[in-house]
Image: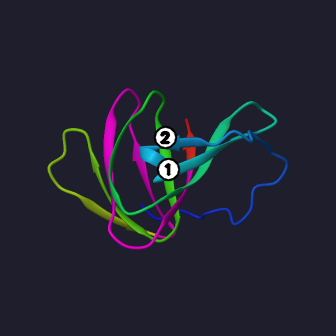
Amino acid sequence: MTTPFPKQLDQVSVQLKANIYFDGKVVSHTLLEKDGSKKTIGLIYPGVYSFNTGAPECMMITAGTCKIKLKGENKWESYAADQAIEVPGNSSFEISVENGIAEYLCLFR
């Protein structure tokens, strides 16, 4: 899915403690909007990683490339900058970065 992506987020609070996964190969920071909604921005280094979801989320790739496979799917889908994927809540997905670093913005629904 292609969607207009923000190039900047204004008037958010940033939690300084990083969310560090897989020995530092996936790192994000939590952003809180004035209305209490939560987002994360982060970096994914080369590798294959599995994540569980609580709430539904929209993962927007802001730079780089990756492949994502949702729980129950057999096929990996490729994503690049300015593309997004909707991930169901109470589910899981795998993400693979083969080269470089993938950057993302995750919106929690």
User: In the rendering, at what x and y percent does residue 93 appear?
Assistant: 32, 43
Q: How crowded is mark 2: few (under 14 residues within 10 Å), some or many (20 or more)?
A: some
- The image position of residue 75, as x and y in percent, is 17, 55
Looking at the rendered image, the quarter that the N terminus falls into is bottom left
Q: Which residue is drawn at 57% across and 44% down?
A: 107
* Disc 2 element: strand
N-term mark: 2 or 1: 1
Q: Mark 2 points at which residue?
A: 57
**Magenta range:** 81-105
Residue toward you, 55 or 66: 66
The type of residue carrying mark 2 is Glu
Say which amino acid is labelled 1. Gly
**Which quarter of the picture shows residue 99?**
bottom left
**Which quadrant would residue 39 be assigned to in this image?**
top right
Is 67 positioned to the left or the right of 106 in the image?
left
Give the labeled residue for mark 1.
24
Q: Disc 2 and disc 1: Cα gap in Å?
A: 22 Å
Q: Is residue 58 above or below residue 82?
A: above
Q: In this view, does 52 lie to the left or right of 6?
A: left
Question: Which label was assigned to residue 96?
Answer: none
Query: Which residue is drawn at the image coordinates 41% and 30% (left, top)?
Result: 89
Q: Do the residues labelled 2 and 1 touch (CB within 8 Å)?
A: no
49 displayed left or right of 59: left
What secondary structure characterizes most of the magenta part? strand
Label 1 SS = helix
Q: Which residue is drawn at 80% across and 45% down?
A: 12
Q: Does residue 15 belong to the magenta stretch? A: no
The x, y position of residue 97, in whole percent, is 36, 63
